[in-house]
Image: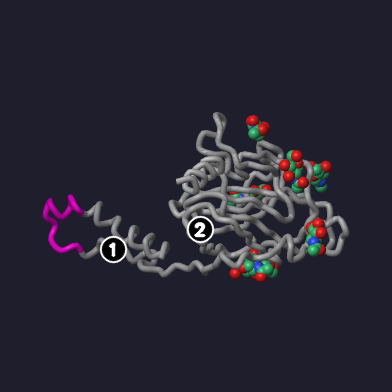
Amino acid sequence: MLPSLFLATTAATLASAHTVITYPGWRGNNLHTNEAWPYGMQWQYPCGGINLTTNRTYWPTTGGALAFQPGWFQGHQTAFLYVNIGVGTEGPDGGPINMSNPMVAPFQLLGPSNGPFPGTVCLPQVPLPTNWTMNPGDNATLQIVEIAMHGAALFSCVDITFAAPGDPRIPEVNETNCYNSSDLGFASIYTITTTPIGASADMNVPGSGASLLRFAPWMGYVPVLLGAAWLLM
Ligand SMILES: *[C@@H]1O[C@H](CO)[C@@H](O)[C@H](O)[C@H]1NC(C)=O
Ligand SMILES: *[C@@H]1O[C@H](CO)[C@@H](O)[C@H](O)[C@H]1NC(C)=O
Ligand SMILES: *[C@@H]1O[C@H](CO)[C@@H](O)[C@H](O)[C@H]1NC(C)=O
Ligand SMILES: *[C@@H]1O[C@H](CO)[C@@H](O)[C@H](O)[C@H]1NC(C)=O
Ligand SMILES: *[C@@H]1O[C@H](CO)[C@@H](O)[C@H](O)[C@H]1NC(C)=O
Ligand SMILES: *[C@@H]1O[C@H](CO)[C@@H](O)[C@H](O)[C@H]1NC(C)=O
Ligand SMILES: *[C@@H]1O[C@H](CO)[C@@H](O)[C@H](O)[C@H]1NC(C)=O
């Protein structure tokens, strides 16, 4: 009785939270559900409800480490993870206007349970997007997106200033601040094309009775649903 009560309270307290960035830094604690954020702050694009910050962390121009704790809420027995970068100052908060630049291929997280779980993920060398060059002193924002099992996305960011590799202002990466917990697993995400573009599925419907036409729109959804179910396997 007591342990489950405790768990329920913990879950309620953390009800808006999924991702905490532990390296190289974090825009700030956005693990809040309140009147201003009745659904929880972290669901808000692009950075979980926290505007651009000015206390930036230094990060190498060649790309670098990123560590985070993905399990601060229920519903993450599995999750999809994305890491993106945004640059520029055209956003309403003076930061990037978008985060549409992926840095790593999306991957799946395998959690130990569907409840909140501890554990940390370390990506030791997140590269810049292909053909990107950043110079020391340039600013950018790194974004982690975590897609829950139900398809909604959580956002968390860190604002960085680029520095030359080896610059002493870049916080040290080591086995205490960047490691993969042994109770977390990973899986590759891939898709299988079932209907190539142009291979329309409704060309060969036999007959043309009214009852068939009535069912046609509904039948059109079947491959889409199957495709989604396949992805979630
Ligand atoms: C910046 O300051 C905020 C507010 O004090 C803090 O929550 C956040 O962790 C800081 N970020 C970095 C990268 O130091
Ligand atoms: C980067 O951000 C810092 C802090 O917000 C700001 O002082 C600096 O002028 C910015 N640098 C560039 C090149 O925009
Ligand atoms: C994202 O923002 C940049 C400016 O920082 C702009 O050049 C680019 O077109 C935008 N991309 C999308 C997909 O909106
Ligand atoms: C973030 O910035 C926008 C645009 O300036 C502003 O409307 C909003 O109130 C700010 N949000 C917070 C949480 O400070
Ligand atoms: C943690 O796991 C991810 C996914 O398999 C991998 O890319 C990364 O290199 C691992 N981190 C460490 C420190 O081994
Ligand atoms: C990167 O640059 C090379 C050389 O200009 C070009 O051929 C290639 O298409 C670019 N790749 C991407 C992903 O933009
Ligand atoms: C790991 O690096 C952090 C700074 O990022 C430092 O505070 C900590 O002492 C280092 N730990 C070890 C064991 O060197």
Is residue 172 found inside the magenta-colored segment of the image?
Answer: no
In the rendered structure, which amino acid carries the disc numbered 1? Ala
Image height check: is 93 above or below 154? Answer: above
Question: Contact (CB < 8 A) between labels 2 and 1?
Answer: no
The magenta stretch is 205-215
Q: Measuring 14% from the left and 57% from the top, which residue is drawn there?
A: 208
Of all residues, the one furthest to the top in this rendering is 35
Is residue 207 found inside the magenta-colored segment of the image?
Answer: yes
Task: Classify residue 90 as left or right of residue 154.
Answer: right
Q: Residues within 10 Å of mark 1 (few under 14, many from 20)?
A: few
SS at mark 2? strand
Task: Classify residue 60 as left or right of residue 210.
Answer: right
Question: Where residue 116 appears, x then y in whole percent?
Answer: 53, 52
Q: Measuring 67% from the left and 52% from the top, which residue is drawn there?
A: 21
Q: Measuring 74% from the left and 66% from the top, which residue is drawn there?
A: 175
On residue 107, the disc is none
| In this view, the mark in front (2 or 1) | 2
On residue 201, the disc is 1
**Label 2 vs 1, first from the N-terminus:** 2
Of all residues, the one furthest to the right in this rendering is 168
The residue indicated by pointer 2 is 79
**Nearer to me, 78 or 224:** 78
Question: Where residue 138 appears, x then y in whole percent?
Answer: 80, 52
Whether residue 133 can be seen here: yes
